Amino acid sequence: MAQNDDSFFREVNEELRSDQLQYVWKRYSRILIGVAVLVVLGTAGWRGYEYWENHGSSQSGDRFIAALDLASKGKNDEALAALSAIEKDGSGAYPVLAKMRAGSVQAAKGDTGAAISTFTAIGGDTSAPAAIRDLAKLRAAWLLIDAGTYDQVSAQAQAMANQGQTLANSAREALGLAAYKAGNMAEAKTWFQRIAEDASAPRNVANRAQIMLDNIAASGKAP
């Protein structure tokens, strides 16, 4: 923007050297000055906005860290109040991060229903980054293994279980455990096999999948 300012004034000065444009200057000087003022004010406004945005993000970051500290000390209600405030007036990515953390705090204090609702809301928020939405859906799915049905877990995790998805094997594990809990051993075996056969699966996830496959085989309830 500053380069545009210099260019604008240089061109005006060069043109004013000619007698012909001296007439133009006399006639249109107020307009040219007005345009120059708007350019300068535009630059100042942009710099001001950048300062405001950076300053706001810095403040939100400090508040977010303070809320995490409260949660780490087991002060869950205070942490939730602080996170709720950031959701309402924080800047940058901090509002959605605060909401994610609020879901974790709710789960930690045993309010599973509230945590599922929080994560489900984030998962459906198209203004949030896709990676955050997927992580929220996965968190909801894992909570629903114990608190919900296989269909509810599937509604959250199924789309992420496809090959190539970043959270594919975590989603498959959630689906496998939900199916196992529901007594559907054939479905559970399918999900755990997909993990075991995926060379990209993290070792700990693959090991757990193999343990579950051994348990299913020992039960004799799946072909």
Image: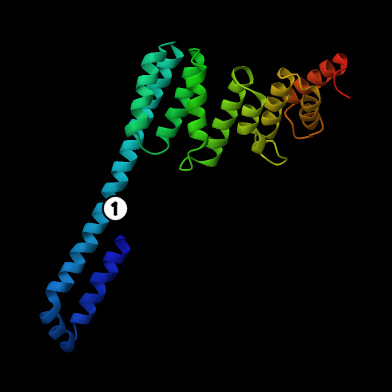
**192 left or right, relative to 129:** right
Q: Among all residues in the image, which is located at the extreme top?
A: 74
- Looking at the image, which is closer to me, 66 or 145? 145
Quarter the C terminus occupies? top right
Tag 1 secondary structure: helix
**79 left or right, relative to 28:** right
Which quarter of the figure has residue 189? top right
- Looking at the image, which is closer to me, 93 or 179? 179
Residue at x-position 23% and y-position 79%: 14
**Residue 145 in the image: above or below residue 120:** above
Q: Among all residues in the image, which is located at the extreme left?
A: 26
> Visible in this render: residue 111?
yes
Residue at x-position 23% and y-position 70%: 9
**188 left or right, relative to 126:** right
Residue at x-position 49% and y-position 33%: 122
Q: Which residue position holds label 1?
A: 46
- Looking at the image, which is closer to me, 103 or 94? 103
**Residue 218 in the image: above or below residue 155:** above
For the residue marked with disc 1, what is the amino acid? Answer: Trp
> Visible in this render: residue 104?
no
Residue at x-position 43% and y-position 20%: 68
Q: Residue 127 at x, y = what percent?
A: 45, 43
